[in-house]
């Protein structure tokens, strides 16, 4: 089914605005994919052909890009798309358990939606918020320090229509289609609402201020890494900051020197076996 004349006219108008931001039309492919996803909730074949036509490239080229990035969905997802981080830190902090209990609770798996179309789930490899692990996202807004119980309550509230606010970010949770339109480059005016960075994220900055740590002048100036008279003398005469790990506390020599065989039994054909 192709887009109706009214929808196509609106999409073409928005596409023209997006393409105008780039020196080469095909550079606009990623936001254009978000645009068509904001219309249908996923990237359909109609959406792929629309993007190809607008950019003067083939549908195969559009498909290659849209299937590479996981933010583009090729089947309908829920009005609220819930991502559960199962990468290393979130996993050890409880992310795997959250995912297992949430899938059992909702009866749906990865990139699947509940029968009412309200909620879908996704296993996320990293939400880039390790300081708040375990973390979940709803339409790319953060929900921090989650537990299985909080995760199930969150999904139930979303399905029942209750107002749910993210831990950080805007004061209202938008729909999946609305989030896709924002990613296409049409802001909803909520970028500066709510908490932007929590205490955990700012801890390093606060510690640096307390200890008087500063970036080298060459880094501040955006230098290429080469030495200069300014960078060579930037820290001259300044007391070295107290380091949490002293040189004497480091094992000498290291347990395994680079390039040396790793001790113990190894699996035939493994990298360790080849080293030996």
Image (cartoon, rainbow, N blue to C red):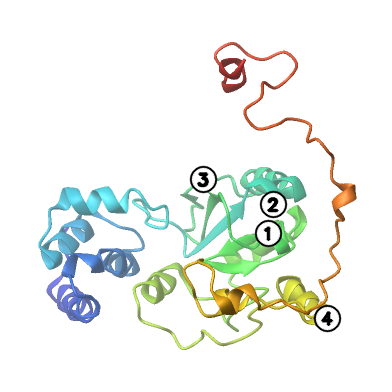
The residue where tag 1 is placed is 130
Which is in the foreground here, disc 3 or disc 4?
4
Mark 3 / mark 1, whichever is N-terminal: 3
- Using a 10 Å C-alpha cutoff, classify the residue at mark 2 as few (fewer than 14 neighbours), some (14 to 19) or many (20 or more): many
Instruction: Please give the label number shown on residue 90.
Output: 2
Q: Residue at point 59% right, 11% down?
A: 268
* Structural distance between the alpha carbons of marks 4 and 2: 29 Å
Q: 68 or 73, which lies in front?
A: 68
* Structural distance between the alpha carbons of marks 3 and 1: 21 Å
Q: What element carries label 2?
A: helix
The residue where tag 3 is placed is 110
Residue 198 relative to residue 67: left or right: right
Residue 109 relative to residue 88: left or right: left
Q: What element carries label 3?
A: loop
The residue where tag 4 is placed is 210
Q: Is mark 1 on a helix, strand or loop?
A: helix
Whether the residues at callouts 3 and 2 have beta carbons within 8 Å, the answer is no
Residue 141 relative to residue 132: left or right: left
The image position of residue 224, as x and y in percent, is: 46, 68
* Structural distance between the alpha carbons of marks 3 and 2: 17 Å
The image position of residue 141, as x and y in percent, is: 57, 70
* Structural distance between the alpha carbons of marks 4 and 1: 23 Å
Q: Can residue 2 be seen in this view?
A: no
Instruction: Please give the label number shown on residue 189.
Output: none
Mark 1 / mark 2, whichever is N-terminal: 2
Whether the residues at callouts 1 and 2 have beta carbons within 8 Å, the answer is yes
């Amino acid at each position: 089914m192709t887009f109706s004349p009214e929808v196509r006219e609106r999409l073409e108008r928005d596409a023209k605005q997006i393409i105008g931001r780039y020196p080469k039309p095909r550079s606009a492919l990623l936001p254009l994919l978000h645009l068509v996803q904001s219309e249908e909730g996923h990237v359909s074949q109609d959406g792929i052909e629309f993007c190809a036509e607008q950019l003067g490239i083939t549908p195969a080229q559009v498909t290659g890009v849209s299937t590479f990035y996981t933010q583009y969905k090729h089947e309908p997802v829920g009005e609220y798309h819930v991502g559960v981080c199962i990468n290393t830190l979130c996993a050890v902090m409880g992310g795997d358990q959250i995912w297992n209990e949430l899938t059992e609770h909702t009866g749906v798996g990865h990139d699947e939606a509940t029968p009412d179309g309200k909620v879908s789930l996704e296993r996320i490899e990293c939400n880039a918020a390790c300081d708040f692990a375990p973390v979940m996202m709803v339409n790319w807004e953060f929900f921090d320090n989650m537990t299985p119980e909080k995760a199930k309550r969150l999904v139930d509230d979303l399905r029942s229509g209750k107002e749910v606010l993210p831990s950080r970010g805007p004061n209202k949770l938008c729909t999946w289609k609305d989030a896709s339109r924002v990613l296409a480059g049409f802001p909803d005016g909520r970028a500066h609402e709510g908490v932007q960075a929590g205490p955990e994220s700012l801890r390093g900055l606060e510690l640096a201020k307390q200890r008087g740590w500063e970036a080298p002048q060459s880094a501040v100036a955006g230098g290429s890494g080469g030495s200069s008279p300014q960078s060579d003398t930037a820290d001259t005469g300044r007391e070295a900051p107290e380091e949490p790990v002293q040189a004497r506390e480091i094992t000498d020599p290291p347990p395994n020197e680079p390039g040396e065989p790793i001790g113990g039994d190894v699996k035939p054909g493994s990298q360790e076996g080849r080293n030996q």
